Image (spheres, coloured by chain):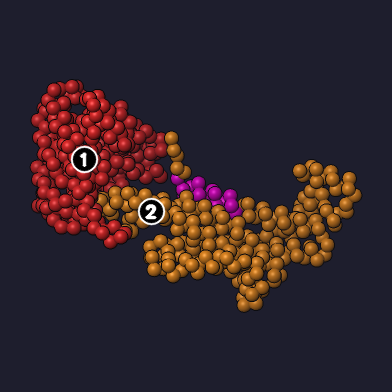
Amino acid sequence: MLIAWQLAVPILGLSEFVLPTPAQIIARMAKDWALLLTHARVTLLEVLGGFACAVAAGIPTALLIFYSRMFERAVYPLLIAEQAIPKVALAPLVVLYLGYGWAPKIFLAFLIAWFPIVVSTVVGLQALDPAMVRLVRAMGANPWQTFIKIRLPAALPNVFGGLKLAIGLSVIGAVIGEYVAAERGLGYLQLQANSQFDTTLNFASVITISALGVGLFFVLRLIENVVVFRRETK
Amino acid sequence: MSTGAAVRIESLRKTYETRTGDDVEALAPLSLDVAPGEFVAIVGPSGCGKSTLLSLIAGLDAPTSGRVLVDGDEVRRPHPKVGIVFQNDLLLYWRSVLDNVLLPVEIKGWDRNASRAHAEALLGQVGLADFAGRYPGELSGGMRQRVAICRALIQEPDLLLMDEPFGALDALTREQMIVDLQAMWRSVGNTVVFITHSIDEAVFLADRVLVMSPRPGRIELDLPIAFERPRQWTIHKDPEFQRLAGEIRAIFEADGVLNGGPDRRAASMSRTLDTRN
């Protein structure tokens, strides 16, 4: 496809500002790598901040939902309602209240990422065979031991499923925040390129954003491979 | 080492409340004494309350009335000297075989290193010495259930409760497991309460077979089995064995659990079907 793209642009006689070729984009990325890296660093920190908040809030919320029926009844409907709000529509409001700095980007990344963490963690906690709980109770296990020895390890594959979903969403949240109001970050860079009709840099920004998401996803997978035992079946 | 625990069950009864608010009696008042070191098998049709009885003995459920005494102590919560093996091996797939066997040791807060040799010895006894470092996913069903038995035995239980432990295994594996269980029990010397719906399994293994009626469970027959030990698989052909098994089968036929059919072969077929499901 890249080859077709590369060939089609001169054949159709398109100028770089309408559609740059892949070679032009790569050359631009090589030339402006320092600029892209500076902005990528900002976006990365926003993503990690939002993701960390999502984990820090999402997992305890999931535990409360799982262990307290009252909390589940009170909070789950609110959570689902919150999930239904398009975060893009919230972005201008978030900026209005949190300003132009780090906060609105981190908050948007958090807001969009924490729901999958909550849901997948709850599903994971429910995944344990009740007979397993009886078995360890018969061994004299207290609730804490039941949690740490069997329920948590059994939940981990699902938890990581949620985390992998959430990391990609964090990137989206941070970039949305940058679109609305920012002075740095890849979303800001892309808007700048857009307003200057610098289509090549625009593409370069998109590619860098994607690379960021993919990179973070693989880092999580690496951690998962160390932490989670993959279930083997005969 | 384990010694056999005495079990006394005094008018034990369990009812469950259904969603509609009715009480369903799972276990009719039941009294029973099991001597230290005795191997008791309980046979009954599905849903007769055998597993309920086992949960009550284990202290996992509270009786509606009556009580269970293990060595004179009333059971109100899981008893530290009682081990359980369920129909499903319930191994943790993320733990190696050795770590699965050591799970009760960790939960009880014993010294893991001190118990390690014991765990390895138990695995050796069931022919799994070379599998200590493997994971449950790499093992066959029979091997997994052996690990589950080792996990129960490492607690040095004076009373071992087994809830249809071989119910999920194929016929050949089951045969070997029955023979091996007898050997293991003889070396440990603890009390065993073994639940099954296989008549042959019960007669082969037990000192005493209790036959339970359909729900609500009552003991309909208390049958001593006097064969010498170790018992050989060939005793299945012994006329006395057949007579004892026939006596148990007659109860199930009288209860309508088994339909004898026009001849013995059909009866034995339906028996096989019953034990398989």
Task: Give the residues in magenta.
Answer: A216-229
Q: Quadrant of the C terminus of chain B?
A: top left
Q: Nearer the viewer, residue B199 or B24?
A: B24
Can residue B68 be seen at all in this image of the molecule? no
Label 2 is placed on what type of residue? Answer: Arg
Tell me the quarter of the picture where residue B190 sits. Answer: top left
Q: Disc 2 sits on a residue from what chain?
A: A
**Residue, disc 2:** A151
Label 1 is placed on what type of residue? Answer: Gly
Q: Residues within 10 Å of mark 1 (few under 14, many from 20)?
A: many
Q: Is residue A223 magenta?
A: yes
The residue shown at (47%, 50%) is A157
The main secondary structure of the magenta stretch is: helix
Q: Nearer the viewer, residue A207 or A84?
A: A84
Q: Nearer the viewer, residue A108 or A103?
A: A108
- Chain identifier of the orange chain: A
Can residue A177 be seen at all in this image of the molecule? yes
**Residue, disc 1:** B44
- Chain identifier of the red chain: B
Q: With A170 as the anchor, is B229 left or right in this view?
A: left
The residue shown at (13%, 22%) is B239
Q: Is residue A8 above or below residue B132?
A: below
Q: With A223 as the anchor, is A205 left or right in this view?
A: right
SS at circle 1: loop
